[in-house]
Amino acid sequence: MTGDGQPDCQGYYFYAGEHDGQPIYERTDAGYTIWKGPIVWNLSLAPGTTLPGYWFRPPGQPVEGVFGPYNAYTGNPIATALTWP
């Protein structure tokens, strides 16, 4: 994860299992998680958690790409090279 997300969400993310039947990715220090909700990919503190804020990919988009901020988070983190089994 690169880009300018605030709080700082940059780092390496690895496949960490599933949440509601969808793949999740955790940062190596478990600080943030990328997970798929009913409509969009989300980047937040934990699967299913959107407080105090989160970033998301537009509906219908793959997990790789620019995430937009929502609520208390700012900037645009960029996910690249994610794979799952």
Image: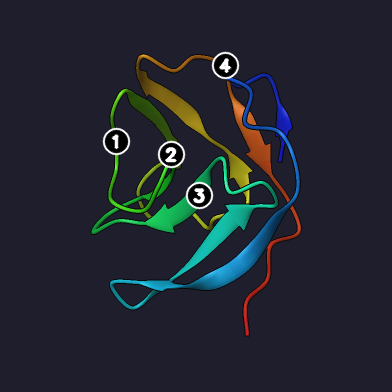
Q: Earlier in the sequence, mark 4 or mark 1?
A: 4
Q: Residue farthest to the bottom? A: 85
The residue under label 3 is 33
Per the model, the C-alpha gap separating discs 2 and 3 is 6 Å
Q: Are marks 3 and 4 in contact (CB under 8 Å)?
A: no
Q: Which quadrant of the structure image shows residue 5?
A: top right
Q: Earlier in the sequence, mark 1 or mark 2?
A: 2
Q: State the residue at coordinates (31%, 23%).
A: 52
**What quarter of the picture does the N terminus occupy?**
top right
Q: Secondary structure at mark 3?
A: strand
Q: State the residue at coordinates (47%, 28%).
A: 68
Q: Is residue 60 left or right of residue 2?
A: left
Percent from the top left, x then y, of residue 83?
Answer: 68, 71
Per the model, the C-alpha gap separating discs 2 and 4 is 11 Å
Q: Are marks 2 and 4 in contact (CB under 8 Å)?
A: no
The three-letter amino acid code for the residue at tag 4 is Gln
Q: State the residue at coordinates (62%, 69%).
A: 15
Percent from the top left, x then y, of residue 29?
Answer: 67, 46
Label placed on residue 50: 1
Q: Earlier in the sequence, mark 1 or mark 3?
A: 3
Per the model, the C-alpha gap separating discs 1 and 3 is 11 Å
Q: Are marks 1 and 2 in contact (CB under 8 Å)?
A: yes
The residue under label 2 is 44
Q: Earlier in the sequence, mark 2 or mark 3?
A: 3
Percent from the top left, x then y, of residue 33?
Answer: 50, 49
Per the model, the C-alpha gap separating discs 1 and 2 is 6 Å
Q: Secondary structure at mark 4?
A: loop
The three-letter amino acid code for the residue at tag 3 is Thr
The three-letter amino acid code for the residue at tag 1 is Thr
Task: Judge the density around disc 1: few (<14), some (14-19), many (≥20) Cα neighbours within 10 Å.
Answer: some
The residue under label 4 is 6
